[in-house]
Image: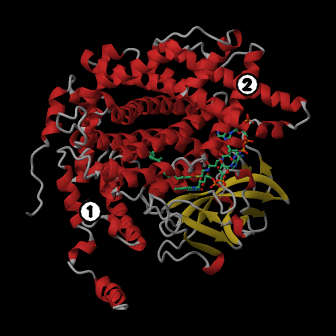
């Protein structure tokens, strides 16, 4: 019997949708920032997803490495042609870029990643954030219209985290008013930049600046890599350039390597909004050396929404599949149930739905804070930069880690079929887990936050004023333990108390070690497990608190039925966080065995309450099938038909007798007859 799509929605999914107690369209409006934004999102998606030129004829899974790249570049050009047209019509603005570069619409049209993404995510923002007005005039026009394509070349073969240790040099020659770029060692070769391999003809290169025989640390330079007409690497052998080879995921991103042999660039190509080199080689310091790190902060901020997007896709796939899949009766006398009725399955899936909401709210919070602080920086006010750095570092670390764990858990929640590329969960995992490493490896970022927390603790000890994100430390100094209060505000206080005590202990252990004669750096390294954990605890308390505060007036903005379900998810997030940190809560918050049993009961009650709304809720994320790209997660739930149709696409299935039979198996199988 030929397998065809039925054109009908799976009856189990139909029943789920009938059970939903709130209006899914209202949820979509709330989640996407209001009616206007939702309508724009849908129009944009239709424009891209229905374009015959942007359909996937062959799944990329069956393509070679080279084909994936060529196909990706072709698609990227078509995508940006459409984006250009939208911009020219004055439609969409930054929202178009947010959508097309990230894990929602972007990953729907270009599953393996976009080889031109770093041009918009880092090359342009670096010129904007670190170029002078003249440099912006010189470069931005051509970069915006993509007449030149750039990347961000910071990481080297030998150094990614410790950027002060980068080895690429840019030595100023006052005679010609040029910088001379060199890669003195193999470890100094740039390694990793997205699109560097074959897709960019310019790069922001981060290099050690030498002038008048002195090193002034790392600075950004605009360097041409390839001829604009011929695309040949410039000046024969002086630029050595290529791509780094296959990776776990992001297979279409064309990450590259780059080496310099006496490559000369004009003085004006050093980005000089902050630090400067004058014609005679005089160096003028920046108001703060960390302003060079600004692009990384920008990307850490946008990654948060990207993680919410990827997780929302994975959890939509797993929730719908869990409603369609029937396996094992609960009562042996009755038929097999939908796997979503097994409570352990609910426990795998629903907390990940809750995380999408929390991450989305956090993305709004951090985006607003980022915009406030950068507008202050433009006026020369640097006061709030450390707080933004501290909170964005731990949020990036915790949210990428949770999203990555979440996608993997959801893949497993789909059993064997989750392991198929046709589920789109393996590819999603490849995209998400990369974010745990890029833009600052997560442990490093937690340690950056911890560095700030140590300072904040010492300020709290002497009664100095504290910024809002660490204000809770002041109360914790006075009160080291608490009486357990199971309300949401009580949970927030308890999580803050855990964080504050972990910060205190890490601080005390660093200080004790210093008293034993260790240097500050060695004492810090010896205490770094506790330091990283204190930053993690701080972030988790922050996530619950900010979600709670950002939804304070929920009842006045949405219907009671929607507010009820949203509150259930926020409460589930808070309770699940408590269950994960139960040992810490016992240590520091006055939680008792009775309290734990109450939390367990509450967790189970919440799963039961959420159960009838789960499918409706993920429908409210409003993710079109073409973006989900999943046989398991499509709106109609025709899982088995889709899996079959995908399997039929395998090149091996195009011929009933494989070549390998005549070539290898037959001679082998008969050789011992
Ligand atoms: C215009 C564009 C239009 C449209 C585009 C719009 C939107 C795009 C939208 C959507 C896109 C969607 C998704 C994007 C998602 C994915 C992106 C795609 C691809 C990603 C490509 C990846 C790129 C990269 O990975 S680039 C390389 C990144 N590398 C790193 O992150 C390195 C990590 N290391 C460091 O940052 C540093 O080395 C360090 C660990 C911080 C240590 O540095 P250093 O040794 O100097 O520091 P100290 O510890 O001694 O600290 C000194 C001092 O500085 C403070 N500090 C450190 N960093 C910062 C900072 N960034 N800002 C402010 N302050 C900072 C630190 O706290 C110390 O302060 P104190 O001395 O006061 O304690
Ligand atoms: C998909 C992808 C895309 C990327 N795109 C770009 C790009 O466009 N441009 C670019 O410039 N770079 C890019 N990168 C590079 C990326 O930014 C680095 O890989 C990242 O910053 C981590 O650095 P590393 O690889 O040197 O890791 P390492 O620093 O070598 O980390 C290895 C281990 O050492 C630990 N470690 C290191 N230092 C410390 C410390 N001080 N304390 C405690 N532990 C420590 C880490 O926690 C980790 O466990 C990309 C990377 C990936 C994976």
Q: Residue at the location (45% across, 58% down)?
A: 250
Q: Is residue 673 above or below residue 283?
A: below
Is 320 placed left or right of 255 in the picture?
Answer: left
Pointer 2 residue? 505
Q: Residue at the location (48% across, 12% down)?
A: 486
Secondary structure of the residue carrying tag 2 is helix
The response on whether ligand 1 sits within 8 Å of label 1 is no
The response on whether ligand 2 sits within 8 Å of label 2 is no
Q: Earlier in the sequence, mark 2 or mark 1?
A: 1
Colour scheme in use: secondary structure
**Which quadrant, please, contains the C terminus?**
bottom left
Q: Residues within 10 Å of mark 1 (few under 14, many from 20)?
A: some
Q: Nearer the viewer, residue 360 or 565?
A: 565
Q: Residue at the location (37% across, 42% down)?
A: 95
Residue farthest to the front?
673
Q: CA distance from mark 2 to mark 1?
A: 54 Å
Residue 193: image location, x then y, percent = 56, 60
Q: Residue at the location (48% across, 77% down)?
A: 230
Residue farthest to the right?
517
Residue 302: image location, x then y, percent = 48, 41
């Amino acid at each position: 019997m030929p397998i065809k799509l039925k054109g009908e929605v799976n009856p189990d999914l139909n029943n789920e949708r009938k059970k939903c107690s709130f209006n899914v369209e209202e949820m979509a409006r709330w989640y996407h920032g209001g009616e206007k934004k939702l309508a724009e999102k849908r129009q944009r998606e239709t424009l891209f997803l229905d374009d015959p030129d942007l359909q996937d004829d062959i799944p990329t899974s069956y393509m070679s490495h080279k084909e994936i790249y060529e196909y990706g570049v072709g698609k990227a050009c078509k995508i940006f042609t459409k984006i250009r047209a939208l911009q020219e019509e004055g439609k969409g603005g930054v929202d178009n870029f947010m959508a097309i570069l990230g894990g929602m619409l972007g990953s729907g049209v270009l599953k393996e990643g976009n080889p031109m993404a770093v041009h918009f995510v880092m090359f342009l923002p670096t010129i904007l954030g670190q170029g002078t007005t003249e440099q912006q005039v010189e470069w931005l026009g051509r970069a915006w219209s993509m007449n030149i394509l750039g990347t961000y070349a910071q990481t080297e073969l030998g150094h990614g985290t410790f950027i002060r240790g980068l080895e690429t040099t840019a030595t100023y020659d006052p005679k010609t008013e040029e910088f001379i770029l060199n890669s003195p060692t193999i470890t100094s070769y740039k390694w990793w930049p997205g699109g560097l391999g074959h897709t960019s003809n310019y790069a922001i290169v981060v290099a050690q600046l030498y002038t008048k025989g002195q090193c002034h640390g790392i600075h950004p330079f605009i360097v041409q890599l390839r001829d604009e007409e011929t695309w040949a690497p410039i000046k024969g052998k002086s630029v050595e350039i290529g791509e780094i080879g296959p990776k776990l995921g992001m297979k279409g991103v064309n990450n590259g390597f780059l080496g310099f042999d006496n490559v000369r660039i004009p003085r004006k190509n050093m980005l000089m909004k902050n630090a400067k080199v004058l014609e005679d080689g005089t160096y003028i310091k920046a108001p703060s050396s960390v302003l060079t790190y600004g692009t990384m902060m920008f990307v850490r901020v946008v990654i948060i929404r990207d993680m919410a997007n990827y997780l929302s896709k994975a959890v939509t796939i797993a929730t719908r599949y869990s409603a369609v899949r029937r396996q094992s009766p609960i009562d042996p006398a009755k038929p097999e149930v939908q796997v979503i009725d097994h409570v352990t399955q609910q426990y795998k899936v629903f907390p990940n739905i809750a995380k999408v909401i929390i991450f989305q709210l956090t993305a709004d919070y951090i985006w607003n804070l980022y915009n406030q602080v950068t507008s202050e920086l433009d006026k020369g006010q640097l006061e709030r930069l450390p707080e933004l750095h501290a909170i964005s570092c731990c949020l990036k670390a915790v949210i990428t880690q949770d999203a990555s764990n979440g996608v993997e858990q959801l893949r497993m929640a789909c059993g064997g079929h989750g392991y198929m590329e046709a589920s789109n969960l393996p590819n999603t995992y490849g995209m998400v887990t990369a974010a745990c490493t890029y833009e600052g490896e997560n442990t490093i970022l937690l340690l950056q936050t911890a560095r700030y927390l140590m300072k904040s603790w010492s300020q709290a000890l002497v009664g100095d004023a504290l910024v809002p994100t660490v204000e809770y430390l002041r109360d914790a100094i006075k009160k080291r333990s608490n009486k357990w209060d199971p309300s949401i505000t009580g949970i927030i206080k308890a999580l803050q108390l855990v964080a504050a005590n972990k910060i205190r202990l890490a601080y005390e252990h660093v200080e004790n070690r210093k008293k034993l004669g260790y240097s500050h750096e060695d004492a810090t390294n010896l205490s770094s497990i506790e330091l990283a954990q204190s930053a993690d605890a701080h972030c988790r308390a922050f996530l619950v608190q900010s979600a709670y505060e950002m939804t304070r007036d929920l009842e006045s903005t949405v219907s009671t039925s929607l507010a009820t379900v949203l509150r259930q998810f926020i409460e589930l997030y808070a309770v699940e966080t408590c269950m994960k940190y139960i040992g810490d809560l016992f240590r520091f918050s006055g939680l008792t065995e009775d309290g734990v049993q109450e939390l367990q009961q509450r967790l189970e009650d919440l799963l039961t309450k959420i159960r009838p709304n789960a499918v409706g809720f993920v429908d409210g994320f409003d993710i079109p099938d073409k973006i989900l790209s999943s046989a398991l997660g499509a709106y109609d739930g025709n899982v088995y038909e889709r899996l079959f149709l995908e399997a039929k696409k395998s090149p091996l299935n195009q011929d009933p007798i494989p070549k390998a039979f005549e070539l290898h198996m037959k001679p082998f199988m008969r050789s011992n007859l």
